Image (cartoon, rainbow, N blue to C red):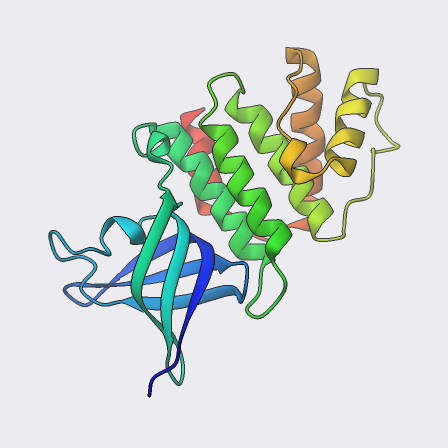
Amino acid sequence: MQEFLWVTGIILKQTPIGEYDRRVLLLTKEKGKISAFARGARKPGNRLAAATNPFSFGTFKLYAGRDSYTLSEAEIHNYFAELMTDYVGAYYGMYFAEVADYYTRENNDEREMMKLLYQSLRALCAPSLPDPLVKCIYELKAIVVNGEFPGVPGDRKLETSTIYAIQYIERAPIEKLYTFNVTDAVLQELKEVAEEYRRRFMDRTFKSLEILKTLC
């Protein structure tokens, strides 16, 4: 009898396979980052069509094969539909998913990274928070979660509010990350610090980030 399991997770990306199928990359609470095939997900009206779109968050029923998983059912709790109608917001979300893909591994405990991605996608949907601020917070906290964060840079003269913001991002629980706003001057300094740390600690070119730079 074929074994199956339910996992809670977020779709990081999906890739067309053959004429009707999709391969999805999932960040899950139980298994870390895993890939799965969704048979027939590209057929019109298929019950897995919407559930396999990027950013879909929910529970997924998987069958374990010898080399991969097969997705058979999904119960989606949040599609982040706001990002599907916001071209720029969608690219921010894709960039966040790329960073999560970069940092996570299969069978690792990736609950903090999954929580960070989920809360950051929610923040992108909040009109009160500017997307560039959400991006800075996400980048810096991702480095914190990965255990590489060096603290406030000592070689820069920063505003007191910028120092406080960096310290808050480092120490605050993920659920309370997106509870503040900043002035334009502080945001500019946060952008510079986040850019410096991203280049230092993320050894990769992110395709969605390159597109974002042409849009913003």
Relative to 60, is 77 above or below?
A: above
Residue at 57% across / 65% down in the picture?
A: 105
Q: Image quarter for residue 78?
A: top left
Can residue 133 be seen here? The reply is: yes
Left or right? Give the position of 32 relative to 187: left
Residue most extreme to the right: 154
Relative to 114, is 159 above or below?
A: above
Relative to 108, is 202 above or below?
A: above
Residue at 67% across / 34% down in the picture?
A: 194
Residue most extreme to the left: 44
Numbered label tally: 0
Residue most extreme to the bottom: 1
Quadrant where the image shows the N terminus: bottom left
Quadrant where the image shows the C terminus: top left
Q: Which of the pair 140/196 is nearer the observer?
A: 140
Q: Position of residue 45 (x, y in %)?
A: 12, 51
Q: Position of residue 198 (x, y in %)?
A: 65, 42
Left or right? Give the position of 89 relative to 136: left
Residue at 50% across / 59% down in the picture?
A: 28
Q: Image quarter for residue 70?
A: bottom left
Residue at 83% across / 34% down in the picture?
A: 153
Q: Position of residue 148 (x, y in %)?
A: 76, 51
Q: Position of residue 46 (x, y in %)?
A: 16, 56
Q: Which of the pair 8/107 is nearer the observer?
A: 8
